[in-house]
Amino acid sequence: MAEEVLSWDQLTKMPPAAAEVRASQIETIAKIAHERFSNGTVGRLLQECGGLETAMPSDSFEASLVRVTRRDWERQRRVPTELAGRIAQAQAEGYAIWIEARRDSDFGKFLPALQRNIDLRMEYIDCFEPTESPYDVLIDDFEHGLTASDIKPIFDRLKPEVTRMTRIVVENASMVDDAPIRGHFPKASQEALCDTIAGALGAMPEKWRIDETAHPFQTSFGTSDIRLATRYDESFVSTSLYGTIHEFGHGLYEAQVDERLNRTPLGAGCSMTLHESQSRLWENLVGRSRAFLSFAYPTIRLAFPEALGTVTDDAFYKAVNKMKPSFIRVEADELTYGLHIILRFELELDLIEGRLKAADLPEVWNAKVKEYLGLDVPSDARGVLQDVHWSAGHFGYFPEYLLGSVLSVQIWDKVARDQPDLDEQIAAGEFAPLQNWLKEHIHRFGRTFTPKEMIERAVGGPLDPEPYLRYLTAKVNHLYGGPAA
Ligand code: ZN
């Protein structure tokens, strides 16, 4: 937890010149934490408590605590403390280098740090039993039990369909205009609006805060300490508004974990896919819906009387739902977002399975953007350097973003069946029934279940791309009048 507080500070408040000393501080903490957790004492305690696993029901707090702690412990103790320290230091240093390289749009500047992160990941993979793909080891850190072979058929199903729908929105681009959300939106007004909207959704100021950062994120230090970080673009109101709603979804998950799980390995979201299903649900299924905007748009318009004074509800709804191929993943619309992720998944798999050299990334990246999105990447900053993940050596993290979107629609369909007046509630600004459903069926359990178990319990089946495709098809048809799929 101390390491996370240091990282939060690094990403939001710390003066840039402190990067080097912060990297050393984080390395020290990471090593101490790793050493204390992976040493024999925890192993002995696990052995002593082992009986609880069989004596208690498997979803009880006691059995779950022993099971999940053992899983974490067995994973961690395979990694030498010295390697864990080098990884943590390379992450912190890589972040500082990435910030500079992205600012200067200079991939060459970032390449040595990236190569070091890849080499460290290969060392890390070698600590584990061989898996079907070495990439599976990395995915497992974010989504226990998920493999590249689980992901491929889902992405293979999505890729041609999303590409097909992308062609429809490009051909009919003039049907939806996003000019209303482009203009001048003063930062101070955006900050106030983000506070108001997050507050309306349920972010209580005594437990939550919102700060500014280069790359939006959420972190929490317990169910009563939720930190959101967003970024502001004065020419485009969606960045901060939908960034905040997205991070709110992550924060709500952490805030609604059963507080008895605080300060235990169970006291966090189940996995990245589950987490992302929550952020995407709030961002897209709630935030971009007519129901939500009929509640929120009067407030949004009041915040920017000059830019939005004459913009109607309908024009704003269409503007925030405009679909258009673009360079930046975090600003991508719901539809083309998937192609950004599939591209990264393919590149990561090729990198980790040894078919692609890091030095060739910009070239391959740009070729794929051209192929999938029809765009010519103008600079590394708007291409291969845009995401923070590789600077921290986080490979295996991207696919869960799209799987989260897939799951968000499965969950939404389930909630809508259980609560037929969901739209009316949202239009009235009543979010408690939706929050309670999510708490009851997903949030409160924290890490008690494996991701696959949790998904099965929440939606009654495994990850399924079909509801997501139906949702996208309906939205594309509704906004762009494309032929039915
Ligand atoms: Zn997210």
Image: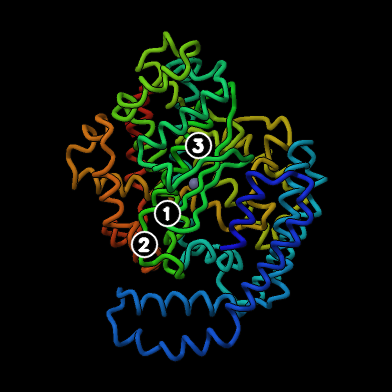
- Report if residue 33 is visible in the image: yes
Is 194 or 79 nearer to us in this picture?
194
Point out which mark residue 259 bears: 2
Is 66 or 451 nearer to us in this picture?
66
Of label 3 and label 2, which has the lower sequence position? 3
Q: Which residue is mark 3?
A: 243
Q: Are marks 3 and 1 in contact (CB under 8 Å)?
A: no
Q: Which residue shows up at 68% across the image and 38% down it?
A: 383
Q: Which residue shows up at 41% across the image and 12% down it?
A: 311
Ligand 1 within 8 angstroms of badge 3 C-beta: no
Residue sticking out furthest to the top: 310
> Considering the image in quadrants, where does the N terminus appear?
bottom right
**Distance (Cα) linking label 3 and label 2:** 26 Å
**Distance (Cα) linking label 3 and label 1:** 21 Å
Mark count = 3
Q: Which residue shows up at 46% across the image and 38% down it?
A: 162
Q: Position of residue 30 (x, y in %)?
A: 66, 68
266 sits left or right of 385 in the view: left
224 sits left or right of 92 in the view: left
Q: Are marks 2 and 1 in contact (CB under 8 Å)?
A: yes
Dot 3 surroundings within 10 Å: few (below 14), some, or many (20 or more)?
Answer: many
Q: Position of residue 46 (x, y in %)?
A: 47, 86
Q: Which residue is mark 1?
A: 224
